[in-house]
Amino acid sequence: MNTVIRNARIIDPANQLDRTATLYIVEGRIAAFDEAPAGFTAQHDIDANGLIAIPGLVDLSVRLREPGYEYKATLESEMYAAVSGGVTSLALPPDTDPPLDEPGLVEMLKHRARRLQQAHVYPIGALTVKLQGEQLTEMAELRDAGCVAFSQADAPIVNLQALLRALEYAATFDFSVWLRPQDPHLSRDGVAHDGAIASRLGLPGIPACAETVAIATRLLLAKETGARLHFCRLSTAAGIDMVRQAKRQGLPVTCDVAVHHLHLTENDIGFFDANCHVIPPFRNQQDLAAIRQGLLDGTIDAICSDHTPVDDDAKHYPFGESEAGATAVELLLPLTLKWAREANVPLAAALSKITSAPAGILGQQTGQLSPGMRADIALFDPEAWWQVTPARLHSQGKNTPFLGLEVPGEVHYTLVSGNPVYRRAD
């Protein structure tokens, strides 16, 4: 299938490209700019006047809720939500039910996702059997089944000997290990940042040291083993600075931050708003400033949605008893654009955090518009503002702290391997 995109402003951070051009797609791949290939005939002709064409977004954490949690969301609903937000490649944490700890489960999930012919799905395999933190999974077999990295998701790994063995094994085969740093003892039963707001509301707190203690331990083990380590969802100024120092020492460490942590603090809990119950919790204003600075100086490599759809009933409990998580895959682009506007960040630099940078962490040839590359493309109007409402969100989960907010950036088209999989309704 051949497609031509005319009159778009093309921004490709990986290739430092920012200009108006005509883009030609042949059999699912970028063929040429401006001059049509010989014998080219388009089955799809898109006039993108007033729109920006960018590489399809790469999201490092999207829970599709299958298998096991279909009452919260389905592959169909969440993959369509992803492409409606311009996300064309997404990584799946292993905390499904059962967890992604066997090759058969990974193969089944990839097969189901391929049949939908929407976004590309990259499973993250379980680091330990059933995510119990003791027995290592058969990582080589999981890699062969399609896993691109290994993680515990939000499940703690208390047994540091097991973690050391896992990192040694991963280093031997050059597997990447993704860990969310939070000490389970220091954070036990916590639901909010351990500060004045949690104290005033009577909520059990999660101190900043729960993150930094975990980071310190894992950095020491990474240094001992030489394993490639990716820290998921940093939230504290001190934790970010620890990763900054580790990078200066040359350790093979990367990290990301959830997009909602670019905008919200503990103050936004308000009067027990359960939509603000997320893990890690929203921290204080100094931590938010450190997150933004970490993105600017390159300490934080990527922004992800940490998309976690939750059924309505689970958010209707009191704050401390509600289920943690926020739906966000459709808000990854708008909230990134909002941050860029507020922090005066160049558009290409901001877009790199959700395209080429996360693609590099995944180790996949995507997130750029080079000739010969897979034609995963999002076309959006940067000047179109829209209101976040339950009806506007395609995700089955409507649990977001941004309900009612006006955000910039409306996706008009999403192409995956050259195929138009989403078009904004007129």
Image: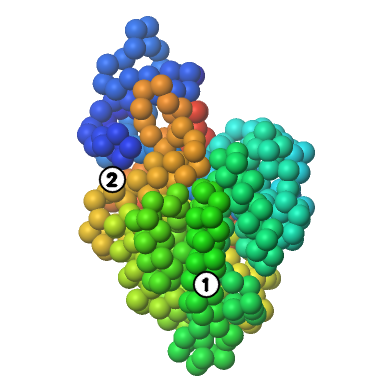
Quickly name the residue at label 1.
213
In this rendering, would 82 be left or right of 29? right
Determine whether 118 is above or below 327 in the image. above
Query: In the rendered structure, are the residues bearing label 2 and label 1 in contact, judged by CB atoms less than 8 Å apart?
Result: no
Residue in front for this viewpoint, 169 or 350: 169
Determine whether 319 is above or below 76 in the image. below
Q: Name which of mark 2 and mark 1 comes first in the sequence.
A: 1
Q: Residue 278 is drawn in which quadrant? A: bottom right
Furthest-top residue in this view: 39
In this rendering, would 134 be left or right of 328? right
Quadrant housing the C terminus: top left
Image coordinates for residue 31, horizontal then vertical, percent = 37, 19
Residue in front for this viewpoint, 385 or 325: 325
Please say which color scheme the image uses: rainbow
Determine whether 162 is above or below 216 in the image. above
Total marks placed: 2
Quickly name the residue at label 2.
348
The residue shown at (22%, 34%) is 19
Image coordinates for residue 210, horizontal then vertical, percent = 54, 75
Image coordinates for residue 257, horizontal then vertical, percent = 45, 60
Q: Secondary structure at mark 1?
A: helix
- Whether residue 314 appears in this view of the structure is yes
The residue shown at (33%, 25%) is 23
The residue shown at (74%, 59%) is 134
